[in-house]
Image (cartoon, rainbow, N blue to C red):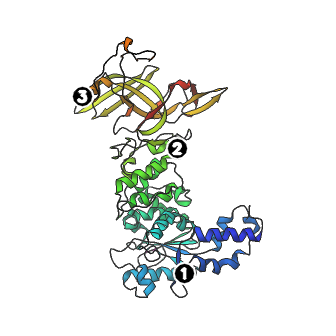
């Protein structure tokens, strides 16, 4: 809680030095100013503290430390650079766009503005890294985001505007609290007397982006609902392949080190690993080929992997997920499955049933090979751990979701392992020799299948039934 004027100033200093852009354009003279200049400019206003904001200082500060921010589709060439603006030599269509943006910002009473074209010194790797990691927060903290739709005249044109297909503009749409849209001639596309969310434009944006109106009205970044949110990015493009991952950091509220040159696959794997640390099972709800990860088969290749994901109820709580040298370490409720039948004609048609619950039958069509010598299991992800006296039991939902897992007999891999020999008991004293019996390799998810839904009989979908903790097993995917 903010209690004194000194506390107000300390919070103000922290905010300005960390939560607004490194550099802004001062609209009165079109010169760059840093955070220290911004702090000096707004300090007197912050001293007029409204006590009603004592518990919520950040919204108050964002309302006082005002700047406009631009969202637009970059030109192929001709955008003004930091060096050109600093030297006063910026010119051309990109500079004209910048000046139109600044003019609109002035109309809304702004004294400062920010554009990603010229307000970042891209020769500084440190500044570029901070800017990319902070971008969502800078758009969220802006007083107004001005969107220029360079290919649109009317709201109907928005459906074909490139702005809706670019990777970075996704967070620029979701982060700001106040957005104003302008067409190619810088004419307003919304009624300034009403919030833009009450305009027909929001219907067009929902249709073209696939983002529900509730999320467009007020988006909360978090590493949750990953399967749904990834589909919003699936059709978007970026110039640099790594930006597919970097442009999603703010949406999922995670942070990555920026490393251009690492490649899009590696960057997206790092993004998924960061999201997994939060434990939301929805990050596992994808289908198709896995990424070329060095240890795990549970990492999707791209946002496109989430397109067509199954609509599952994955709300039981957090799932412990840790990436290790053996793969993704995750505790799953393992229920055995039997290979009931299969036919093979280019595509395998497989039926699996559960001996512990005979009513459950799972049908799949896959190109994978199946054998009656393999072991199969359902690995449930949306279970609950419930304290029961001195022990824990497992809460299983009537409508559950899980992986179809299989593992192969170790003898089938014997050609790649050292020869097996059973020692004579007389050669060892006190050493427990394991008798030769059938051993299996670790569990693996059936490729390209993703999560499946299982409905337990006579259990309402939202209800939970309890089973023994013995069915919980650590697996490496």
Q: Is residue 407 left or right of residue 21?
A: left
Magenta stretch, main secondary structure, is loop
Residue extent of the magenta highlight: 182-186
Say which of 303 and 146 sits in front: 303
> Mark 3 and 2 residues: CB-CB less than 8 Å, in contact?
no
Image coordinates for residue 291, horizontal then vertical, percent: 35, 47
Image coordinates for residue 392, horizontal then vertical, percent: 61, 28
Q: Quadrant of residue 242?
A: bottom left
Q: CA distance from mark 3 to mark 1?
A: 68 Å
Residue linked to disc 1: 33
Residue linked to disc 2: 279
Residue linked to disc 3: 344
- Observer able to see residue 149: yes
Q: Residues within 10 Å of mark 3 (few under 14, many from 20)?
A: some
Say which of 178 and 443 sits in front: 443
Q: CA distance from mark 3 to mark 2?
A: 37 Å
- Residue at 34 percent across and 16 percent down: it is 423
- Residue at 47 percent across and 20 percent down: it is 356
191 is higher (above) or lower (below) than 256: below
- Residue at 30 percent across and 34 percent down: it is 366
Label 3 vs 1, first from the N-terminus: 1
């Amino acid at each position: 809680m903010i209690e004194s004027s000194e506390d107000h100033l300390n919070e103000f200093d922290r905010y300005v030095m960390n939560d607004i852009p490194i550099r802004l354009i001062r609209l009165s003279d079109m010169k760059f100013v840093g955070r220290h200049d911004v702090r000096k400019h707004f300090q007197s206003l912050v001293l007029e503290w409204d006590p009603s904001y004592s518990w919520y200082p950040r919204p108050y500060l964002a309302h006082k430390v005002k700047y406009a921010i631009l969202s637009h589709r970059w030109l192929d060439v001709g955008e003004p650079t930091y060096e050109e603006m600093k030297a006063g030599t910026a010119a051309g269509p990109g500079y004209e766009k910048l000046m139109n943006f600044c003019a609109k910002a002035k109309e809304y009473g702004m004294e400062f503005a920010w554009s990603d074209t010229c307000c970042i010194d891209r020769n500084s790797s440190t500044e570029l890294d901070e800017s990319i990691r902070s971008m969502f927060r800078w758009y969220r903290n802006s007083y107004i985001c001005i969107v220029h739709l360079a290919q649109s005249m009317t709201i109907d044109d928005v459906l074909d505007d490139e702005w809706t297909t670019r990777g970075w503009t996704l967070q620029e749409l979701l982060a700001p609290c106040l957005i104003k849209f302008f067409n190619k001639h810088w004419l307003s596309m919304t009624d300034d007397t009403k919030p833009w969310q009450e305009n027909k434009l929001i219907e067009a944006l929902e249709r073209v982006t696939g983002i529900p109106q509730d999320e467009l009205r007020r988006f909360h970044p978090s590493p949750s609902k990953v399967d749904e949110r990834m589909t919003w990015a699936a059709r978007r493009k970026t110039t640099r392949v790594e930006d597919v991952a970097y442009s999603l950091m703010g949406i999922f509220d995670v942070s990555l080190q920026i490393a251009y040159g690492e490649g899009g696959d590696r960057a997206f794997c790092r993004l998924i690993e960061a999201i997994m640390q939060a434990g939301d099972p929805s990050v596992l709800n994808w289908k198709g080929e896995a990424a070329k990860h060095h240890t795990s088969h549970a990492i999707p290749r791209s946002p496109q992997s989430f397109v067509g994901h199954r609509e599952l109820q994955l709300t039981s709580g957090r799932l412990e997920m840790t990436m290790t040298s053996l793969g993704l370490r995750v505790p799953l409720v393992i229920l055995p499955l039997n290979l009931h039948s299969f036919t093979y004609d280019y595509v395998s048609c497989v039926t699996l049933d559960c001996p512990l619950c005979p009513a459950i039958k799972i049908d799949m069509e896959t190109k994978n090979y199946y054998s009656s010598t393999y072991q199969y299991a359902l690995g449930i992800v949306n279970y609950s751990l419930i304290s029961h006296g001195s022990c824990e039991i497992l809460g299983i939902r009537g409508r559950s979701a899980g992986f179809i897992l299989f593992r192969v007999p170790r003898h089938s891999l014997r050609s790649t392992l050292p020869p097996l020999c059973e020692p004579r008991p007389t050669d060892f004293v006190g050493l427990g020799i394991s008798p030769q019996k059938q051993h299996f390799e670790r569990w693996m998810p059936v490729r390209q299948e993703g999560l499946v839904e299982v409905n337990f009989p006579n259990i309402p979908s939202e209800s939970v039934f309890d089973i023994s903790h013995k069915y919980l097993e650590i697996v490496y995917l």
